[in-house]
Amino acid sequence: MSLSSFVYENFFASKYVLNLNTYKVKKEARMSSEIVFSLINNMSKNNFGYEEMLGINNGHNPSDEELNKLAEFMVVETEKIPAGYTYLGQFIDHDMALDSATVDEIPPWDLISSSSISNKRTPFFNLETIYGFESPSNPDEPARAELLKPGSQSLLNLGDTVKDTIQQSFPNDLPRRSDCPIAVIVDQRNDENLAVAQTQVAFIKFHNAVVEYLKKNHGGGDTPATFETAREIVIRHYQWIIVKDFLPKIIKKSVLNDVLTEGNKFYFPKQNNVFMPLEFSVAAYRVGHSMIRNSYNWNHLFNNDSSPDLDEPSSTHIDVATLVQLRIFTGEGGMAGKNNLPSDWLINWNWFYSIDHSIALKKQKFNFASEINTKIAPLLGVLNPRVVIFNREFSLPALDLYRTRALGLPSGQAVAKTILGSKERILKPEQLANLLPENLKYKFSKKTPLWFYLLAEAEIEEAGQRLGEVGSRIVAETFVALLKLSRPSILNEDFHPNSDFCGDEGEFGMPEMLKFIRDSNKDFDELNPIKDEVVERWLKIIINQNK
């Protein structure tokens, strides 16, 4: 049917058709003139009125306060998660768990006994991936002495970037071997993508900034005692970030507060049996996979530049940074043939965390995480760029889904019923069916893989901004229980962050940690190292063009 076949008709025309042939011409003329006169008269007096179409005559009468609250709600911008927390979550995951057998060694296509997999990390929040151990038990991990800056007993080692388009080197890379780009760090997974690698660099810099703070304000020297004092300070502040900044971003605050005040209901590890819950490690905490984006505004060279500012000239940008590129510029990715990270690829932290209101000031550049829902970034569905069609071996969502089945995890509905206590609170089949294609509605709307169910719960109940009730409970109980078993632990002592590290309102989180690092170094902007270099280069280009 073409658009031209649609015509307009009177809404009630079928009931009130007049056969004008039954009227005499004179009467028709009189009626016509009367109608016209009436219309003109009404128009001049503005007598066209309003009436209810349906005639219900039962006015809804909410209070002023209720209407005010509704109006206020309608203009509140949805709170989104800054993208930095995606990779902070990955960094935390690596600090608490390392499977003895990888997916490559035990493919998830068949059943896997959980007893065949052990955790090679201490499952506590002690920054093991930063500090390691004096005598590590895991093979190929450097001893703590190898992590120290050469010639120092208190500072951790860093690597220097190499000059590229940006003709300046910065101490903002991971320490690397001299013969190849492999990083000299405890966990090589923290060098598998550039975002988590730069997060590792940030925590190393935080330790070093605390060491210098102790030397300046408490008379500390370059000694093992200063190292140990700084280590404990950093660990406690790291734990504070987890409880006060990270967890409230990804789970329901009401659930977190309930677990912190009322205790756990389902997960009760003991010091002699600190097991990692499968429901957490294989399903609920894999929420981070849905938060990953295909690309990011990375820094002043690699961004979309859709809204250039005076300090961000459009002539200097190249394009956004893709996941593929963020993997290439790591030790695992080969560093594009270089031994160290090129300066061009230093992160601009102001676009990943809200630092000095950078969310509001840099709206066009600021990176938010993808919503927590059942949609995964397309590049994660094809982990091998040479594979152009679906292959379960190179699809991250496939690996996650298969792993829940391989380890014998129950359906999302079964887990939800146990946690929520009643069938009525479980997601309805029709709710899940709305998220599934036609050919999968019948199969997965009533019995759903746990990981998918928890992502769907976040999408349906929390608009993709955090995990829902079930996912939040699993994550909160796991974190809180393991934090209480950690040594040191801020949950077992009356701890408050150092006021010199905090923001104006006494808050401390990742933005404040990064600001403390920035304020501890007057040589260059730690949060955005290449900004001045890029602006200077742009000015030179303009000057040369105008000569």
Image: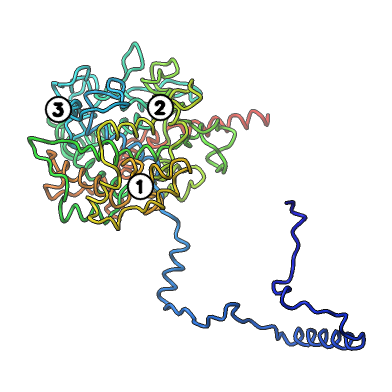
Q: Earlier in the sequence, mark 3 or mark 2?
A: 3
The amino acid on which the numbered mark 2 sits, given as a three-letter code, is Arg
- The mark found on residue 392 in the picture is 2
CA distance for labels 3 and 2: 51 Å
Are there few (<14), some (14-19), or many (20+) residues within 10 Å of tag 3?
A: few
Which is nearer the eye, 295 or 515? 295
Which is nearer the eye, 120 or 471? 471
Mark 1 = which residue? 446
* Residue mark closest to the camera, 3 vs 2: 2
| Horizontal side of residue 101 vs 299, given as left or right | left
Q: Secondary structure at mark 1?
A: loop
Q: Measured from the top left, where is residue 256 in percent x and y?
A: 24, 52
Query: Outermost residue, top direction?
Result: 179
Q: What residue is drawn where x is 34% and y is 52%? A: 427
The amino acid on which the numbered mark 1 sits, given as a three-letter code, is Lys
Are there few (<14), some (14-19), or many (20+) residues within 10 Å of tag 1?
A: some
Mark 3 = which residue? 223
CA distance for labels 2 and 1: 24 Å
Q: Earlier in the sequence, mark 2 or mark 1?
A: 2
- Answer whether residue 292 is visible to the viewer in this image: yes
